Amino acid sequence: MQTELPSDDTTNGPRYDQANDRYVFHHDSDSTATITTTVVHALAAIADTDVSQGEFSLYDSVDPDALERLFSPKADGTERTGGHVAFTALDHEIYVYANGDVIVYPPTDTSRSGR
């Protein structure tokens, strides 16, 4: 099931969706950042992990090269318009959609008070 979310063009940072207890990011396919970079920075922001210090490797959860290929343009140059992939990293559920949405659900056993 793919969930279309309103695009927030003002920032690619985390937006907490309290009603669904999830964080919403959007990957801009026109930027120089890769989808894997967007995912890693999303996790770093949410899980308070310093990715530059080697505290986390996306390879522990998903093959970053495969993730890039899944959402890269087709062989004829057209953009991919459907599909998603889901995986778990740092106890967070991550959903990456072809439209650029990156949805991160925090661990279910974490208290979410104060949000």
Image (tube, rainbow, N blue to C red):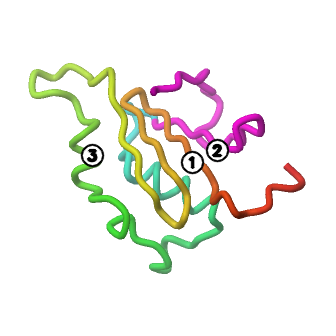
Disc 3 and disc 1 in contact, CB within 8 angstroms = no
Image disc number at residue 35: none
Residue 44 is one of the magenta-drawn residues: no
Of residues 17 and 76, the one nearer the viewer is 17
- The mark nearer the N terminus, 3 or 1, is 3
Label 1 – label 2 distance at C-alpha:
5 Å
Image disc number at residue 23: 2
Of residues 59 and 35, the one nearer the viewer is 59
Label 2 – label 3 distance at C-alpha:
21 Å
Q: Residue furthest right?
A: 114
Name the spot of residue 44 as percent of width and height, x first. Answer: 57, 62
According to the image, label 1 marks what residue?
104
Disc 2 and disc 3 in contact, CB within 8 angstroms = no
Hey, what amino acid is under mark 2? Answer: Tyr
Hey, what amino acid is under mark 3? Answer: Glu
Circle 1 Cα neighbour tier, 10 Å, few/some/many (<14 / 14–19 / ≥20):
many
- The mark nearer the N terminus, 2 or 3, is 2
Q: Nearer the viewer, mark 2 or mark 3?
A: 2
According to the image, label 3 marks what residue?
68
Quarter of the image for residue 1 reads top left
Disc 1 and disc 2 in contact, CB within 8 angstroms = yes
Name the spot of residue 63 as percent of width and height, x first. Answer: 27, 59
Q: In the image, which residues are magenta?
A: 1-27
Q: Secondary structure at mark 2?
A: strand
Name the spot of residue 41 as percent of width and height, x first. Answer: 52, 56
- In this rendering, the answer to whether 4 lies above or below 44 is above
Of residues 62 and 27, the one nearer the viewer is 62
- In this rendering, the answer to whether 2 lies above or below 86 is above
- The mark nearer the N terminus, 1 or 2, is 2
Q: Secondary structure at mark 1?
A: strand
Residue shown at the point (66%, 57%) measured from the top left: 108
